[in-house]
Each structure stands twice: as C-alpha cells, then as structure tokens.
Amino acid sequence: MAENRKAAALHVSDHAVFRWLQRSGAVDVEQVRAMLANALDRAFQVGAAMEVEDFIVLSGGMVFLIRDAVVVTVHEEDSRHGHARLLARKTQGQG
C-alpha cells in the first residue's frame, strides 16, 4: 500500500526561511535593519513632525507601513496605492 502513496510536497514558510537566513548567518539581519531605517528615516521624520502615528511610505516599488515609530510590514506596491503615488508626483511638481 505504501508503494501507491504519492509523496507529499514539503513547503517552507516565509518565517522559516527568514529564521534560517538569520541564524545561519547567510544574511546579517541587523545590517538589513539599519539599511531600511536609514532609507526610510527622511519619510519617518516628516510623519513624526506632523504627529502622525500610522502612515505608509512608498519607496522602490514597496509599501512600508509605519506604526508608532516601527516599520511593521512591507508589501509590494500595487494599484491600491496608485492614488498616493499620483499625489506624491503632484506635490513634487511632476503631475
């Protein structure tokens, strides 16, 4: 009976991949954290000056959600953020 059983496919979660990268030393997570913080600092300072606690930053085709001074998630930019991108172009005189 075991001969007829189809082998199950093994899946690896994003969390497991991240933990392996972190713990194996393949990626220096603290260096990546510092790079992100540096890249997002200017936008964060603007939000902080406006006393906004939750906001998004659109940068490099990515959407960064900042909540209470913490980058809590990152998504690929898609059409849901097109209005914000258009607004950014208009305020920069490109629209």
Image (cartoon, grey):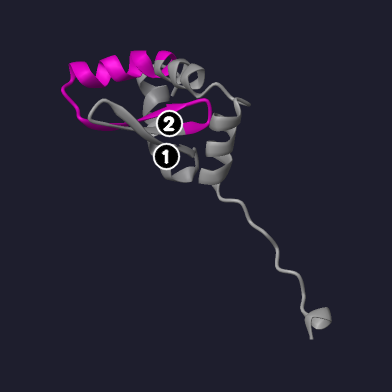
Give me the disc on residue 63.
none
Q: Which residue sits at x=83%, y=80%?
A: 3
Residues at marks 2 and 1, CA–CA distance in whole angstroms: 6 Å
Query: Dots 2 and 1: beta carbons under 8 Å?
Result: yes
- Stretch in magenta: 38-62
Q: Examine the rendered structure and indicate whether residue 87 appears above or below residue 34.
A: below
Query: Please, what is the three-letter code of the amino acid marked with disc 1?
Result: His
Toward the bottom, the furthest residue is 1
Q: Secondary structure at mark 1?
A: helix
Q: Which residue is mark 2?
A: 85
Screen quadrant of the N terminus: bottom right
Screen quadrant of the C terminus: top left
Q: Quick check: 40 left or right of 16? A: left
Q: Examine the rendered structure and indicate whether residue 84 appears above or below residue 59.
A: below
Q: Which residue is mark 1?
A: 81
Q: Position of residue 34 (x, y in %)?
A: 44, 16
